[in-house]
Image (spheres, grey):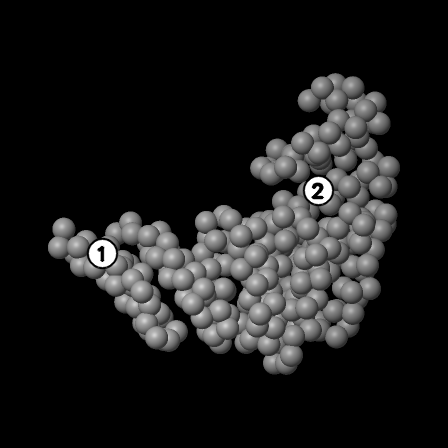
Amino acid sequence: VDAVDGVCAKIIAGISPIGNDWSSVSARLREGRNAVARIPDWAPFAADMADVMYVRALHRYPDALESAEAELTLGKIQESRGNDVAARLHYDTMLLKNPDSHLGSEALLHSARIQMRLEEWTDAAKRWSKLANRPQPNEYAVSARVEMARCLALSPTDGPLALPLIDSIETNWPATNGDERADRLYVRAAALVASKKGDEAMRVLESAMRLGLDQASSLDALRIRAAALELIGRPGEASLAWLAFASECSDKRRDEAYFRAATSAAQAKDFLGVLF
């Protein structure tokens, strides 16, 4: 009880009328969060406290240099809660108010990933482009270009644009290890499917899978393979590939996969397969 009372006292001090400058806010926030962190199961409350204090500080010091850090932290808090739209608003606000901040790259990184989760491929590609072209030294110059190519490849309308980009990446920044090589081949295969080049997509995808893909890409490779099989006129195999993808998929793509499995089965005159 004494420990809890002590923490509560620190929190009350932390969210009481804040001091004369931003440093007092940061100091109180650190003190309160450190105290909360020492008590099991109170970590979510520490995030709530940070949320309250940073919002209050932003209202009081909207033009402070440290406001960029506050917006970034608030974005991360919202992202950890699964509130992607709210998180993106904080990241965008930070970038709008502090375009030259050294934290801009991190804000772009997080906002681009959010848009990928939301499958807003074109807008995500634009953010990756901005990140790739941030002033040097830029640790994301290459990886952001790969992600931009991925977004273009997965876009319903921009897929063919990914091919020249992945070619340029390979020419100027060759892969340094097998994982990078496999991932780039996977992106190339997705772009080839979008470009209606099924045979080449199959060959490239098989090379990527031999090198080894991460778990998320391995799952999506089933989808790319199914689409490639459709393109090269092998509907029976395409149907089985769509079923394999649907059985492993847990998001909204599952319904489309089952529909395409049934469509491919019908094209293969596998009417029993249509039922399943």
- Residues 15 and 82: in front is 15
Number of other residues with Cα within 10 Å of mark 2, as a class: few under 14, some 14 to 19, many 20 or more:
many
Q: Which residue is mark 2?
A: 223
Q: Amino acid at mark 2?
A: Arg
- Residues 38 and 51: in front is 51
From what the image shows, is residue 103 above or below residue 248?
A: below
Is 43 left or right of 244, judged from the image as shown?
A: left
Tell me where residue 249 appears, x and y as whole percent.
61, 38
Number of other residues with Cα within 10 Å of mark 1, as a class: few under 14, some 14 to 19, many 20 or more:
some
Which label number is shown at residue 8?
1
Q: CA distance from mark 1 to mark 2?
A: 52 Å
From what the image shows, is residue 136 above or below residue 267?
A: below
Residue at x 17% of width, y 55% of height: 5
Looking at the rendering, which quadrant does residue 153 occupy?
Answer: bottom right
Residue at x 79% of width, y 22% of height: 270
Tell me where residue 185 appears, x and y as whole percent.
72, 58
Nearer the viewer's eye, disc 1 or disc 2? 1
**Secondary structure state at the residue bearing disc 1:** helix
Q: Amino acid at mark 1?
A: Cys
Residue at x 62% of width, y 59% of height: 112
